[in-house]
Image: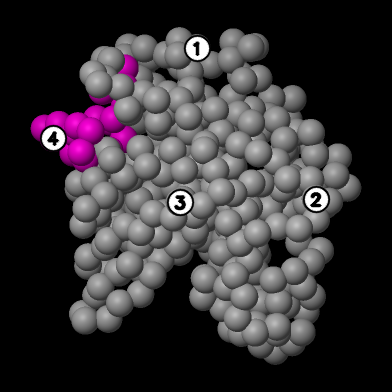
Amino acid sequence: MRGFKSVLVAIALVPNLAATYQIDASCTKAGLEDVVRTAMGSAIEMAESAHSRLRATTWDAYTTKLVGMLFAKDGQTLGHREMSKAESIYRKNFSFYKTEKTSATLLPNDVIIYCDDSRMRRVSRYPRLYEDTVSGEVVQYDNRPCHGTFGDWIALAVTRNPGKDDMIGNINGPRNLPTQIQLCEWFVDWIKRKEIKTTKDLALKSRVASGFIKGSDKNRIFAQIDAESLLDKVLLHEMTHGWIAYNWVWTALGDTETTYGVVDVPSTGKFGLIPILGRLPSYGWKLCRSLAQNGQAVVGQTNANYGAPDNNADTLALFASGMYNSKSSVSSLVKLDRTQKEA
């Protein structure tokens, strides 16, 4: 989960830095350390699968079909140049975050996963401000992970880049710190209840007849990730928000700013009978398909479009999950698309 800003032109800056991931003690306390570790391994394999398929000299029919469904407009043919940005993001995620760091010392390039927000300390009731006792940031209540704004209300997890993302101030002065992935409390509870937690579990139990995606939970109008919001896919989604995944220098109306990681691009068109006003993020198969048709065009790394599918975290996560399931077929994608449209 990330925000969105209106911009015009972008130039990608690609850091060539080593990085690791760490599972916070809050996940051990919640009894989820091994679950998160397994899901991270699966998320890395998803990214590696997507990278490998996109790097192939000639794409097979399944890869071509899924690229067309999630990234291209009707009648548009995408190739290696247009998909170069997505390929680069997948490469960074699997190459940088393969290694788990168990020591306490983290570097700014690393990512840490939290299973609760106990590190947040309230410093002001009116306005509602909290200090992140790890990063030293003071954040508004509406921006506190998993609380506040409507966008955060539907989030399964929230990612911040301390020292880079917008904030009220920093108790300890400017610092660059590891990317934080915060699993939302309600999603942590969901993980504890569900027997199936990762894409591998689904594959082993043959629970998805149509391929890699099962329908979203019926009791949620807007689901962030399809396939029962599996943890490995959520982690990959959040990893693409990390600053090391992609750096952008934007020029808009003469001003220059840097954005770190990809975003949750606002939805386009309609979700069923509900009009989309450009505020809801493009989560799930339906809205990612709509973004491909109605959003900005995918053009690759050079002058990449901010509102394009290759800048949408959920599109990248859905595509990678599809590449991860080698048993899927073109017919399964067609069936999936028809089923989701009818849902």
For the record, the magenta segment spans 62-82
> Residue at (70%, 89%) from the top-left corner?
126
Q: How many other residues sit within 10 Å of disc 4, few (<14), some (14-19) or many (≥20)?
A: few
Horizontal placement of 57 versus 160: left or right? left
Residue 330: x percent and y percent? 31, 14
Choose mark 4 or mark 3, whichever is in front: 3
Distance Cα–Cα, label 2 vs label 3: 23 Å
Amino acid type, callout 3: Asn
Which residue is label 3 attached to?
16
Marks 4 and 3 sit apart, C-alpha to C-alpha, by 32 Å
Quarter occupied by the C terminus: top left
Amino acid type shown at disc 1: Ala
- The residue that label 4 is drawn on is 76
Q: Secondary structure at mark 4?
A: loop
Label 1 vs label 2: CA separation? 42 Å
Lower position in the chain sequence, tag 1 or tag 4: 4
The residue mark sitting in front, 2 or 4, is 2
- From the image, state whether disc 1 or disc 4 is nearer to you: 4
Q: Is residue 315 visible?
A: no
